[in-house]
Image (tube, rainbow, N blue to C red):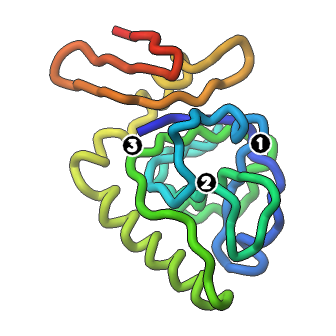
Amino acid sequence: MFYAAGKVVHGFGRGSKQLGIPTANLDASVVARLPSTVANGIYFGWARVEGYPVCKTVVSIGWNPFFRNTTRSVEAHLIERFDEDFYDRVMHLLILKYHRPEKDFDNLDALVDCIHEDIRQANQYLDKPEATIWNHTNWFDLYTLMSTNGTESVPFKLDHVDLRSNMQLFCPKQVSYR
């Protein structure tokens, strides 16, 4: 489980146009600050874009092997549809589950089919009680408060969360919040 936030920037322009599956891309500086323990792959979680409600998300972290990207990226597909773009707005991601590794595909249709299956499985997972407890704005406010270093958000990994007693959150610097 980990949290990251940053400005939404223009990506490669493939999500909406080529795939029909829009994505919001985080700024490269956020990608560079991800903890080294964050593996490339597909993840499920919650997203909140500044000015919008919390919604389900499928996040791709990595190199997008099908497109042979030369830079690592974080791209979030917000499952709830929005009519507008989020460029220059801050997006908060609370990543709950690693789903699968990145992989290459024989053709574009196979990639799109796999993404739709990821979305279907994300919906199922994020409807479970252990996932729905995290879809509240107040959690995002807490993570934003704890991860802000001046004006810049610092991604961090949540190694242990105990909601029944004193909640302990550990970031990469091993700072304990109680």
Which quadrant does the C terminus fall into? Answer: top left
Give the Cα distance between marks 1 and 2.
12 Å
> In the shown orientation, is residue 60 left or right of residue 84?
left
Q: Which residue is mark 3?
A: 135
Q: Residue at x 71, y 11 (%)?
A: 150
Mark 2, Cα crowd under 10 Å, few <14 / some 14-19 / many 20+, is: many
> In the shown orientation, is residue 91 left or right of residue 151?
left
Q: Which residue is mark 2?
A: 61
Query: Dividing the picture into quarters, in which one does residue 84 lie?
Result: bottom right
User: 66 or 49: nearer the eye?
Assistant: 66
Name the amino acid, label 3. Asn
Give the Cα distance between marks 2 and 3.
21 Å
Whether pointer 2 and pointer 3 mark residues with C-beta atoms closer than 8 Å, the reply is no
From the image, state whether disc 1 or disc 2 is nearer to you: 2
Q: Residue at x 39, y 10 (%)?
A: 177
Q: Is residue 41 above or below residue 89?
A: below
